[in-house]
């Protein structure tokens, strides 16, 4: 067997095994079911997660999703905007807590994916415009069955002069346990963390979530990589037969 063929076989192995073992979920394009929030403004809808999810040591199997880019666990009226998420709304996940108006333009989707023990709930705000009709945003939250939370920002341009701060982060709602920041003002060229992914992992020592940021990348499907590698193998085989 030639050295070239050994390299190709190694590439195929990486495609099938390495990709299969990958646990990182990037932008989730399987949006699922269109929510009634797509035709609404300043409202919430109750969704079944499909699994038990631990958030600040409390367990939930349902969540309220809002038009304004947040998730709540015990307050169906919590769709207001503002920077005071420390003790105002109770347990809260602020993906992009801003004055968003899907009823004017954009769509909101939810989906539950995976198998028992490795499930995830995805809520996506796709091409939603802010209330002032200045900026479009596409972002999503992924709640993993193991308690990890991921925010993805495909396009984040902020919101206009809505009289409130745009907030990203998590809060227990007790005034003591939270991790959030205030996003920049609206900008047609994008604001932080546009094009990035934020991961929130539970830290039992601090009884709070740690946040890490990374670049949001598009990962090719395993079948795409395999087809590419097979094509290279075919070309190499033809060359060595001549």
Image (tube, rainbow, N blue to C red):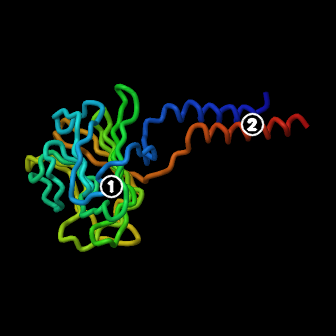
Q: Which mark is residue 38?
A: 1
The answer to which of 161 and 192 lies nearer the viewer is 161
Relative image position of residue 173 (x, y in whole percent): 11, 48
The residue positioned farthest toward the right in the image shown: 242
**Quadrant housing the C terminus:** top right
Tell me if 187 is positioned left or right of 60 in this view. Answer: right
The answer to which of 186 and 121 lies nearer the viewer is 121
Q: Quadrant of residue 3?
A: top right
Task: Give the CA separation, mark 1 to mark 2.
Answer: 47 Å
Relative image position of residue 85 (x, y in whole percent): 14, 55
Please tell me which residue is depicted at 59% across the width and 32% down the height of the picture: 16
The residue positioned farthest toward the top in the image shown: 116
Q: Which residue is mark 2?
A: 233
Tell me if 75 is positioned left or right of 195 in this view. Answer: left
SS for callout 2:
helix
Relative image position of residue 69 (x, y in whole percent): 27, 55
Q: Which mark is residue 30?
A: none
Relative image position of residue 29 (x, y in whole percent): 46, 47
Classify mark 1: residues with Cα within 10 Å, few (<14), some (14-19) or many (20+).
many
């Amino acid at each position: 067997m030639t050295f070239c063929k050994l390299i190709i076989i190694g590439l195929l192995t990486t495609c099938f095994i390495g990709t299969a073992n990958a646990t990182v979920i990037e932008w989730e394009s399987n949006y699922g079911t269109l929510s009634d929030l797509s035709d609404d403004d300043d409202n919430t809808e109750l969704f079944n997660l499909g699994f038990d999810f631990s958030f600040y040591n409390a367990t939930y199997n349902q969540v309220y999703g809002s038009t304004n880019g947040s998730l709540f666990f015990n307050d169906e009226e919590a769709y207001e905007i503002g920077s005071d998420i420390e003790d105002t709304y109770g347990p809260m996940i602020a993906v992009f807590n801003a004055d968003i108006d899907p009823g004017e333009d954009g769509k909101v989707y939810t989906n539950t994916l995976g198998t028992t023990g490795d499930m995830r709930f995805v809520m996506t705000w796709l091409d939603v415009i802010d209330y002032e009709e200045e900026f479009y945003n596409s972002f999503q939250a992924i709640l993993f069955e193991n308690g990890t939370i991921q925010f993805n920002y495909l396009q984040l341009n902020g919101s206009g002069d809505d009289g409130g701060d745009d907030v990203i982060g998590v809060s227990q709602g007790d005034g003591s346990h939270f991790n959030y920041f205030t996003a920049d003002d609206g900008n047609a060229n994008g604001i932080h963390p546009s094009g990035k992914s934020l991961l929130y992992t539970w830290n039992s020592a601090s009884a709070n979530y740690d946040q890490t940021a990374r670049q949001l990348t598009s990962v090719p499907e395993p079948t795409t990589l395999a087809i590419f590698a097979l094509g290279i193998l075919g070309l190499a085989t033809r060359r060595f037969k001549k």
